[in-house]
Image (cartoon, rainbow, N blue to C red):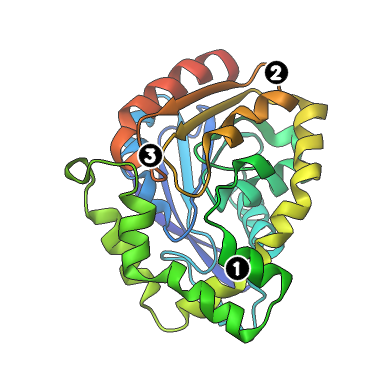
Amino acid sequence: MQVTYKTQHVDNVAVFYREAGNPEKPTILLLHGFPTSSHMFRDLIPLLAPHYHLIAPDLPGFGQTRSPPRDTFNYTFDHLAQIIDGFVSAIGLKRYVLYVFDYGAPTGYRLAVAHPERVIAIVSQNGNAYLEGLSDEWGPWQTYWREPTQAHREACRASLSADTIKNWQYLTGVNAEHMSPDGYTLDIAYMARPGAEEIQLDLILDYRSNLAKYPEFQAYFRDHQPPFLATWGRHDPAFVPPGAHAYKRDMPKAEVHLLDTGHFALETHASEIARLMSDFLSRHSA
C-alpha cells in the first residue's frame, strides 16, 4: 500500500489530494471538514487501501489546496462543491462511495444531488443533514446568519482560535491520552496562515445555505435510497446523535453506529470505523 500525494488543477484552484489503493477496485471519495484537511484520513486510508481505491482532496481554503484570495474567489459551499465536482470529473471518477465529515457533508451532498448515478453508497461520520443534528452551541453562528454585521462576524472568530480547535473540537468527550496532538496542531497551524481566518468566516456565514438545502438533501435520500452508514462520535459538541438517527427517517435501511468518542472520531476510532465500513461496503459497493 502506497499513498501518493498529487495536485489536480480545476479552474484557478490547485486541488491537493491523497490517493491510495487499486483504481480497479471500488473508489471511496473522502471529504474532510472544518478546520482540517485530508490529513484527518491518514489512519483510515492504510486500513482500507488493500481493498478499495481512496481519493481524499483538500477543499479550497483548507490544507494544501491552493486557491485564490477571497477578493477573487467566492468562498461558499456551492463553490466548494463546484470545484470538487470539477475535480472528480478531471481525475475520471465515474462512481464512488461518498465519505462525508462535517463540512464535507454539505459539499458531498451537493455532488450527490447533482449526480445521483455516481454515488454507490454514503458513509457519514458526524456529517449532518437534519436540524435535530445541531447542538445548542451554534448561537454566535446563527446570530451571524440572521444579522451579518461586522460585530457578529467578529463574535464568530472565537471558533477559529487554537483553544477552541484543540479543546472544544478535538478533546470534548475524548480521553486526552488517546488523542494524538498531530491533528489539532496541524489544523491550528493552517488557521494561522495569512487570510485563513477571513476565508473561514466567509464559510461560517455561508453555512446557513446548508440548512436551506437540508430539504433538498433529504429529498435525495428519500428518492434514491443510497446505501447509508453513519459512524458518529456520540460526544460531538456540534453534531449530536439525533442527527445520525434522523437519517433513518428518510432511509429506513440506514445503519447507524454511535461511537464512544467526539467530533474527530477517526483520531481515536479509525480501526473501528474501518471495520464497520468494510462490513458495510462488502454488501453495498459492488
**Residue under label 2:** 252
Q: Amino acid at mark 2?
A: Pro
Looking at the picture, how far across and down is residue 140, in whole percent?
Answer: 57, 67
Looking at the picture, how far across and down is residue 39, in whole percent?
Answer: 36, 52
Question: As displayed, is residue 47 above or below residue 74?
Answer: above
Query: How far apart, in angstroms, are the residues tagged by discs 1 and 2?
Result: 32 Å
Mark found first going from the N terminus, 3 or 1: 1
Q: Amino acid at mark 1?
A: Leu
* Residue at disc 1, secondary structure: helix
**Residue under label 3:** 265
Residue found 69% across the figure and 68% down from its top: 145
Mark found first going from the N terminus, 1 or 2: 1
Mark 3 packing: few (<14 Cα in 10 Å), some, or many (20+)? Answer: many
Residue found 38% across the figure and 32% down from its top: 49
- Please say whether residue 16 is visible from this viewpoint: yes
Question: As displayed, is residue 65 above or below residue 267?
Answer: below
* Residue at disc 3, secondary structure: loop
- Please say whether residue 67 is visible from this viewpoint: no
Question: As displayed, is residue 45 above or below residue 200?
Answer: above
Residue found 42% across the figure and 45% down from its top: 263
Residue found 52% across the figure and 20% down from its top: 281
Mark 2 packing: few (<14 Cα in 10 Å), some, or many (20+)? Answer: few
On the rendered structure, is 5 left or right of 91? left
Mark 1 packing: few (<14 Cα in 10 Å), some, or many (20+)? Answer: many
* Residue at disc 2, secondary structure: loop
Mark found first going from the N terminus, 2 or 3: 2
Query: How far apart, in angstroms, are the residues tagged by discs 3 and 1?
Result: 23 Å
Query: How far apart, in angstroms, are the residues tagged by discs 2 and 3?
Result: 24 Å
**Residue under label 1:** 203
Q: Amino acid at mark 3?
A: Ala
